[in-house]
C-alpha cells in the first residue's frame, strides 16, 4: 500500500502560474495529472524523462514554484509536495485553410494556463 502524504495544518501553499502555454489544455492536463500528489523530487524526475512536448513547460513551472517556496517563504525543498496542479483554457488562435469547393475550414490553435501549487509535508 502506498504511503499517503499529508500537508501540515499550518502549511504555506506556494503557487506558480504559466499563462498562454502553446499546447491544448487536454494535452497539458495529462502531464499535470502525472505529478499531482507526488513529492517534488519524484515529480521532477518523472518530468525529466517524459517524452511529451508539453512536459518542458510543466517542468519549468514546477521549478518556479519550488524557487518561490524556497526564496519567498523559506520552506524546505526536501519536504515539498505538489498539492495541486490544474490546467485551464486560454486564448484560441483561429486560422483558416482552404477546403473543398472553394470553402474555408477552421484551424483552432489552442493554448492553456497552468497553475502548480506546492506545500510542505508533515515532517
Image (cartoon, rainbow, N blue to C red):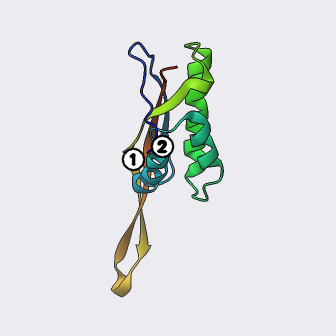
Q: Does residue 72 appear to the left or right of 8 in the view shown?
A: right
Q: Could you tell me which residue is drawn at 51 percent across and 31 percent down?
A: 81
Q: Name the residue beneath numbered marker 1.
A: 91
The quarter holding residue 72 reads top right
Residue 96 lies left or right of residue 66; in this view the side is left
Q: Do the residues labelled 1 and 2 touch (CB within 8 Å)?
A: yes
* Residue 69 percent location from the top left of the image: 56, 20
* Percent x, y of residue 117: 45, 30
Secondary structure, mark 2, is: strand
Helix or strand or loop: what does disc 1 sit on?
strand
Q: Residue at x 57, y 16 (%)?
A: 75
Residues packed near mark 2 inside 10 Å, few (<14), some (14 to 19) or many (20 plus): some
The vertical placement of 48 against 85, above or below, is: below
Q: Residue 5 carries which label?
A: none
Q: Nearer the viewer, residue 74 or 27?
A: 74
Label located before the other in sequence (1 or 2):
2
Q: Relative to the observer, which residue lies in front, 27 or 47?
A: 47
Q: Which residue is drawn at 60% across and 55% down?
A: 50
Q: In this view, does 89 lie to the left or right of 77?
A: left
Give the crowd class for mark 1: few <14, some 14-19, many >=20 residues within 10 Å: some
Disc 1/disc 2 C-alpha distance (Å): 7 Å
User: Would you name the residue on which mark 2 appears?
Assistant: 20
Image coordinates for residue 68, horizontal then vertical, percent: 57, 22
> Which of the image's four quarters has the N terminus?
top left
Amino acid at each position: 500500500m502506498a504511503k499517503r502524504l499529508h500537508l501540515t495544518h499550518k502549511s504555506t501553499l506556494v503557487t506558480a502560474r504559466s499563462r498562454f502555454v502553446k499546447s491544448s489544455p487536454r494535452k497539458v492536463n495529462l502531464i499535470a495529472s502525472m505529478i499531482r500528489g507526488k513529492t517534488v523530487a519524484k515529480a521532477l524526475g518523472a518530468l525529466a524523462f517524459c517524452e511529451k512536448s508539453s512536459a518542458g513547460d510543466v517542468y519549468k513551472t514546477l521549478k518556479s514554484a519550488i524557487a518561490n517556496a524556497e526564496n519567498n517563504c523559506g520552506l524546505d525543498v526536501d519536504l515539498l509536495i505538489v498539492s495541486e496542479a490544474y490546467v485551464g483554457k486560454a486564448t484560441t488562435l483561429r486560422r483558416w485553410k482552404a477546403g473543398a469547393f472553394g470553402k474555408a475550414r477552421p484551424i483552432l490553435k489552442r493554448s492553456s494556463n497552468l497553475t502548480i501549487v506546492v506545500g510542505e509535508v508533515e515532517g
